[in-house]
Image (cartoon, grey):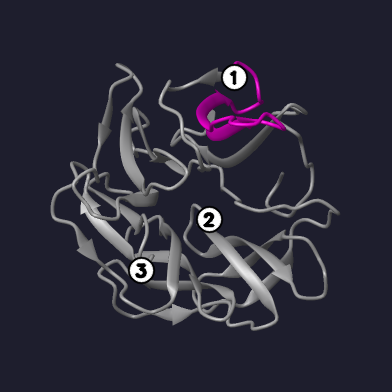
Amino acid sequence: MNDDGSSVTNLTNSPDTDDRNPKWSPDGTRIAFARVARNLPGATWGIYMMNADGTDVIEATELRSFATIDLDWSPSGDSLVFDRVRAPTDTADVYILDLATGDTTNLTSDRPYGGACPDWSPDGMSIAFQDGAGAWDIHVMDVDGANEMPLTGHIDKDWHAAWSPDGSQIAYSRLDVVWEVYVMNADGTGVMNLSAEPTSWDWAPAWSPDGEKIAYAKARFDGDEFGVYIMYAIDGTELGSLTDHAATDWEPAWRPVQ
């Protein structure tokens, strides 16, 4: 859809699959996403790619997952970072997929809790991710898995890290009593609650290309389904809803400006 909520277009239009976590390629020509067969016992999630208009859908890797895959593109557009759950009771791990060769590398295999929900930094040097189990804190590491460092350390659950376009901040979801959208500096300082609304769940932040706004999913406690909302990144001022459907709308992603 457009950034005012108009011109909503169904890109996958696949009644036999569930499609989630869309992410635009850096040049805005392709979209990577997670797909699983609907109503098929034992079906696993895979990573797929398509053109920006929904054509030429292909599976990017044969490595599949028992749980929903979250993913992100490298700034160069030649690799994907993604998470994979090896079995229903195991922790997740963070992998890198080289799109040219098809090779995958596990970055968190030596961690006791693995990792999940990775997001690639704009400079291509770091990956933010969430603990695969346990505390659910936000961590950061080099793209080869080295120099890992926790950025949050709370009794709350921190999830869905998203780098700002200039790499100076990270937005994320935190569960205290309800899910809310937070932002912090890239070194973990300056933590601020942007949504601060105890009457809704606010989830899955995504920065606009200019870094001025954040799109996110909100579900109010009056029975509404999740919808996509937008706020100012500087102070969390809500600018309103972009979607108004009976269905669940969430996990927004901005198309890069070319």
Which residue is pictured at 76% across the width and 75% down the height?
221
Residue where numbered disc 2 is placed:
208
Q: Are marks 2 and 3 in contact (CB under 8 Å)?
A: no
Give the residue type that dot 3 points to. Answer: Ala
Residue where numbered disc 3 is placed:
135
At mark 2, the secondary structure is loop
Distance from the alpha carbon under mark 1 to that under mark 3: 36 Å
Residue 237 in the figure: left or right of residue 78: right
**Camera-nearest label, 2 or 3:** 3
Residue 113 in the figure: left or right of residue 236: left
Check residue 38 for magenta coloring.
yes
At mark 1, the secondary structure is loop
Read off the magenta span.
Answer: 32-57
Distance from the alpha carbon under mark 2 to that under mark 3: 29 Å
Residue 189 visible, this orientation: yes
At mark 3, the secondary structure is loop
